[in-house]
Image (cartoon, rainbow, N blue to C red):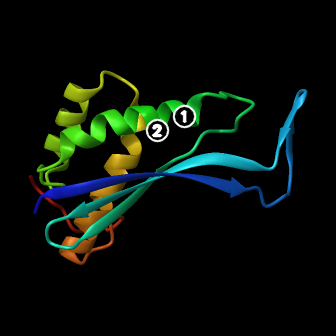
Amino acid sequence: MKITKVSIHKVDLPLKEGKYSWSVHSFAAFDSTIVIIETDEGVTGVGETCPLGPAYLPAYAEGARTGLELIARGLLGFDPLQIGKINERMDQLLNGHPYVKSAIDMACWDILGKATEQPVYNPNEGYTQ
């Protein structure tokens, strides 16, 4: 299995309570980022990275998307089931910034679960690389 496409999407997540206030700042949605990884076998995985809120780190979401764009091109052709190798490759492409890499990691685990027909949380089923 090989990664053929990585899509990065900005999504506004409205707050259930309607509005959040922190000091002098307030907002009604979180700026979240969704990553979709497609493979040559038709299996697709989804991951997300979302900040605590724009008042906490205003540039967080935009920075995550910038990092994801940098990493995405470098993962094409790699096997998403080889999660350890994907993580090594991401470290080669971008030093630090684990919040950026987390969305890709989630999407790869999603693919692994779908490919093996196992829930990702299943503690009784191991997967060796």
Counting from the top left corner in percent of width and height, residue 92 is at: 20, 26
Give the answer, above or below, for where 105 lies relative to 90.
Answer: below
Q: Which mark is residue 45?
A: none
Discs 1, 2 touching: Cβ within 8 Å: yes
Q: Secondary structure at mark 1?
A: helix
Give the answer, above or below, for where 87 lies relative to 113.
Answer: above
Residue 45 appears in the rendering:
yes
Q: Is residue 70 left or right of residue 32?
A: left
Question: Residue, x 30% and y 53% (percent of image)?
Answer: 6
Residue 123 appears in the rendering:
no
Counting from the top left corner in percent of width and height, residue 69 is at: 36, 38
- Which residue of the protein is positioned furthest toward the bottom in this rendering? 117
Give the answer, above or below, for where 24 lies relative to 21.
Answer: above
Q: Is residue 122 left or right of residue 53?
A: left
Q: CA distance from mark 1 to mark 2?
A: 5 Å
Q: Quadrant of residue 38?
A: bottom left
Question: Residue, x 35% and y 23% (percent of image)?
Answer: 96
Residue underneath mark 1: 62
Q: Secondary structure at mark 2?
A: helix
Counting from the top left corner in percent of width and height, residue 12 is at: 65, 53
Q: Quadrant of residue 47?
A: bottom left
Question: Residue, x 10% and y 63% (percent of image)?
Answer: 1
Please tell me which residue lies in front, 50 or 63: 63
- Mark 2: amino acid: Arg
Q: Quadrant of residue 100?
A: top left
Counting from the top left corner in percent of width and height, residue 8 is at: 42, 50
Q: Which mark is residue 65?
A: 2
Crowding at label 1, few (<14), some or many (≥20) Cα neighbours within 10 Å? Answer: some
